[in-house]
Image (spheres, rainbow, N blue to C red):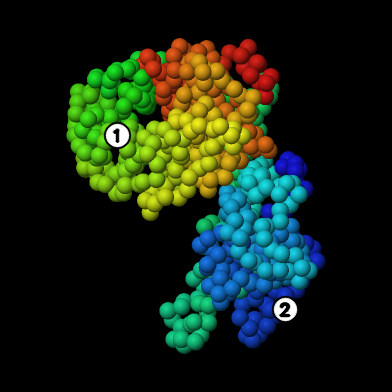
Amino acid sequence: IDLNNPSIYRDLSKPMGALGLARAEQFKERYEALDSNYNRGDEPPAFHYGTHYSCAAYVLNYLLRLEPFSRLALSLQGGKFDLADRLFHNVGASWISASRDNLQDVRELIPEFYYLPEFLENSNSFDLGTKQDGTSVHDVILPPWAKGDPRRFVRINRQALESEHVSRNLHKWIDLIFGYKQRGHEAVNALNTFVHVTYEGTVDIDSIEDPVQRDSIISQIQNFGITPSRLERKPFPSKNFIRPTREISGLNFSLLPYLEPLTPPFCIVGCPHLVHMRVVLDDVCKVGMIGQSESSVGDMCLHKGQLVGVGKTCALLPAMKKYYRFGGSNNGISVHVAIQSGRNWEVNRVLSIHDDMHRAPITAVKPSRDGRWLVTGCVDSTVRVWKHENDHMLLQATLCGHDGGKITSIDISTTYGTIVTGSDDGTVLVWDLRTLSFLRELDTRDKTNLRYIPKPVESVSLNHKTGDVLILLDSKLTIFDINGNLVARMNPRDHFSSKSKPCCAISTDCPEWMDNGIAAITGHKDGYVMMWGINRDNDELLKRHVIEPKVHECAITCLKIEDSRQDTLLCGDTSGKMSMCKTIQLETLSQKDLALILGEC
């Protein structure tokens, strides 16, 4: 499908009922007839559509394959699913119904069409019945361009939403739903009026004394939909859309900030298909090294433009200017000063000690990004979840599931309410942070190797935009989605020797619809750092970039992504050396270098 072809899109300046000339004329005639009766005092206010574009029934019809909406759909239909012919089962048929054939159908899409492919699959194997033509209803039938893949369908939908055509025209649709064409003469002219009780403030429920009439109106609103609040009484402006340029003469550096939001992680603003990194800073780790048997860097952050790193058995809390230290014989952690402040001038000073947090030494810790949560893993395979409040560690739960293997890696996302833990027996488990319970085990086994021997999990890392889980195990990189489905894995041809294999990895926050973005970064035993993208058509990780010149001569032990733009990478190695790499910026390049970069676009 060609997303640059304007003819594939609906007319966003019109509501669903006005997309076809014949259909629009029928709704216009209905309104004129009802308006004539209203003017004589015989009928309520006139409308074009007796149904609505969004209501609970429509939403549940779209989402009925996915819990908890399945149960809600059953409740709405009296304990059983609606007739198979009326269920949402075919995207193409639903479009034809809502845009051409059915005068009672003017529904719009719901947000899940742009981010949640799971609602299109009947993964729970519900019996949805059989249509009159004998066809069983199961998964939703997708358009040919989706190639039967719900993830591809949703990904292309999102790309279409961010396309040039939609960016230049979406404000017209917003005018219909939230703006000046929602009510009044403009709404009438745009064929965009609905039953009067669906509009905010039209009916004062509290003033209706007749309980039967009051219940009837409430039921009508609940079942037939409600128009959202009007946000603006004048036309919404169109979105600024700026195309990346390939010519130096056409390059306006002042416009580059407008391109940043739609630039994939670690790609060049202005040339979003390219990745070029430059080492801009290096230093030596000094914090948290006392008493450590090796000089390895364990965690890093950027503070006022300076690199701050801590030792291998430490984890930073940048917002609090502190760090955790673990692995001691007290089976707990200690909290130290990481960065000088007006309150704490002495770096490495102990602020608090928390003993006996486990029954054996702690082998891995991971604080949440906001510092409120701390997840600890132990040599005895237990995982514990803590809340850090007022210098106190409050135990929330002990999670048991790893069968005897010590915990080697942990990550946590408060955005998705998810914890991921890996152990040295090759097991990767996903936990629910909200209920503090087990969700699933990710299948990391090499099914092609009949003599497969479990290897330790080197790294687990969460994508905070998609919930995808990155796993590094035995030099193999794999990505699963939050529901345990395979997203991508390394091509078998990407083989590394024992001296060059990856030893740590981190996931970026690349959205799934940004095809050219960097999704994963690996640090290797020989000091190289590699950046990987995803070929969504064959679920493979592609090597996109190797950071050069190489500044590390020994194994990388820490990778950290700084900045919300996701264009800054911090690296640390076993010798304690730290470096910072940034995506090049076009405005800082010489004319010669700029010409080379634009020539690659």
Tell me if 339 is positioned left or right of 351 in this view: right
Residue furthest right in the image: 22
Split into 4 quadrants, where in the image is the N terminus? Answer: top right
Residue 24 higher or lower than 301, as above or below: below
Does residue 597 appear in this view?
Answer: yes
Q: Secondary structure at mark 2?
A: helix
Residue labelled with disc 1: 362
Closest to the observer: 391 or 293?
Answer: 293
Q: Which disc number belongs to residue 33?
A: 2
Closest to the observer: 125 or 236?
Answer: 125
CA distance for labels 2 and 1: 76 Å
Q: Residue at x 60, y 30 (%)?
A: 490
Residue 411: image x %, image y %?
41, 38
Q: Residue at x 63, y 29 (%)?
A: 491
Closest to the observer: 323 or 384?
Answer: 384
Tell me if 323 is positioned left or right of 203 in this view: left
Residue 552: image x %, image y %?
45, 14
Q: Residue at x 51, y 46 (%)?
A: 482
The amino acid at mark 2 is Ala
Residue 250: image x %, image y %?
67, 24
Residue 223: image x %, image y %?
56, 73
Q: Residue at x 43, y 41 (%)?
A: 420
Quarter-wise, where is residue 255 in the image? Answer: top right
**In the rendered structure, which disc, 2 or 1, sits on the residue that comes first in sequence?**
2
Category of crowding for the residue at label 1, using alpha-carbon neighbours closer than 10 angstroms: few (below 14), some (14–19), many (at least 20): many
Residue 347 higher or lower than 470, as above or below: above
